[in-house]
Image: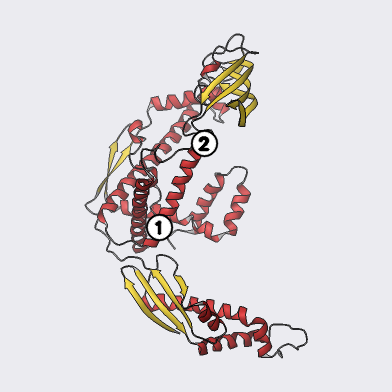
Amino acid sequence: MQVTETRSEGLRREYRVTLPASELEQRLSSELAGLKDRVKINGFRPGKVPMAHLRKLYGRSVMAEVVQNAVNEANRKIIEDNSLRLALEPKIDMAGNREDVEKALEAKGDLDFTVALEVLPQFELADLSGVTVKKQVAEVSDEDLATAIDRMAQQNRTFSPKDGPAAEGDRVTVDFVGTMGGEPFKGGSAEGIEVEIGAGSFIPGFEEQLVGAAAGDERTVTVTFPENYGVADLAGKPAEFQVTVKAVQGPGETVVDDELAKGFGMESLDKLRDAVRAAISRDYDAQSRRKLKKELLDQLDTRYTFELPDGLIEQEFQAVWSQVEADLKNGGRSFADEGTTEEAARAEYRRIAERRVRLGLVLAQVGEKADIKVTDEEVDRALVERVRQFPGQERQVWEYYQKNPGAKAELRAPIFEEKTVDHILGQVTVVEEPTSREQLFRDEDEPASTDAQASAAAGPS
């Protein structure tokens, strides 16, 4: 096997590999000789099948294995001899025309193919000792706690039959038939649906038009589906509902006491308050962590400039772009509705893809240098959390991950990233900054996808 480098430009490498016909013949004969003692062919005793007959029966399939083994061997040789770290799997291109390839498959001609690949960039890790990042910290106020408890009490209150017309806060049981342009549409009809007036659970305008209705009333409710409605065929379109009111119920008194707590599995109201405060605190801590991590990644992004593998960028961009297109389609929206053009959106999301790849490579190198490891126990804990996200399907999800090592390995990447971020935070100065809940959860200007995992392409191996 002869391997010759034919291109070395930036992160791209290309090699030409040649396997002479004589070597192909030798490898084919060796494989057929090993097959001779294993196959059973009618009319021949074991081990006595003529090589010519074996070649006639199995030569083509065995040669395919020979070629695949040669490709794998060439890849290993190229990587090991040149100490390369690949960004993606090599691309193989059989050289020559169909006739040349056919000759090679019959060991009557040389096998020529090219191996094109991209390598990971080499760069020095930046000194972060002078970097300062802010960690926004919000305390759970008594008002936040009271609001949460009141909301739980509202959700837990009882309703009882009411005489007279429905008002804000009442629950109305209705049947309805929806039409568009006089024609019924899929999903537009239902019976026995409970509508809590003012809860905002239905299409805007639907609940408000039930105010004043009494049991037995029939009303025509006209609404327009929101532009971002989940069903694209309905988004932004007007509809008419023929509604029959079956019953009206008024809400009971909202009571915050020990009985409310027991309804949520707590011994007392104080225990419920402690549990809710802890839950809110965890939400605040998680949001604080997200914003701290984003600020840290922003700082890292400004400190590194190096060539990126085009293949990784394209892979990341396609993942992001497919999600963007799916979101627009599901919402029945266009780029014009978002105040942009497809060209401008593509440029923006390619920038995001480049950022993800760059940060992913940085985090991978930081983690490697710090010898950060992800244990099997950590992966198992992550798997348990993933399984809990699918109530009723826990067993199927668990078995899927157990039977698919690749899927289970994907759980390692975010764990590795978080541990690496923790390592970096230990190298910089973190300044806590007290803030309000509103400020902590204020939406950022940049697209949400910028804050996602830095890069799945450069996670731990």
- What residue sits right under mark 1 in the picture? 314
**Where is residue 44, by image quadrant?**
bottom right
Residue 98: where, in percent of width, then height?
52, 77
Q: Residues within 10 Å of mark 1 (few under 14, many from 20)?
A: some
Residue 55: where, in percent of width, then height?
64, 86
In the rendering, which numbered label is found on residue 84? none
Residue 8: where, in percent of width, then height?
32, 73
Q: CA distance from mark 2 to mark 1?
A: 29 Å
For the residue marked with disc 2, what is the amino acid? Gly
Could you tell me which secondary element the residue under label 1 belongs to? helix
Q: Name above or below for residue 78 compared with residue 238.
A: below
In depth, the one of 189 and 300 nearer the eye is: 189
Say which quadrant the C terminus sits in.
bottom left
> Which residue is depicted at the point 54% across and 83% down?
103
In depth, the one of 246 and 16 nearer the eye is: 16
Q: Is residue 460 left or right of residue 303?
A: right
In the rendering, which numbered label is found on residue 230? 2
For the residue marked with disc 1, what is the amino acid? Glu
Could you tell me which secondary element the residue under label 2 belongs to? loop
Q: Is residue 319 left or right of residue 301?
A: right
In depth, the one of 461 and 84 nearer the eye is: 84
Is any part of residue 456 visible from this angle?
no
Q: Name above or below for residue 119 compared with residue 161.
A: below
> Which residue is depicted at the point 57% across and 59% down?
404
> Which residue is depicted at the point 45% across and 85% down?
1
Is any part of residue 262 visible from this angle?
yes
Number of callouts: 2
Q: Earlier in the sequence, mark 2 or mark 1?
A: 2
Residue 220: where, in percent of width, then height?
58, 18
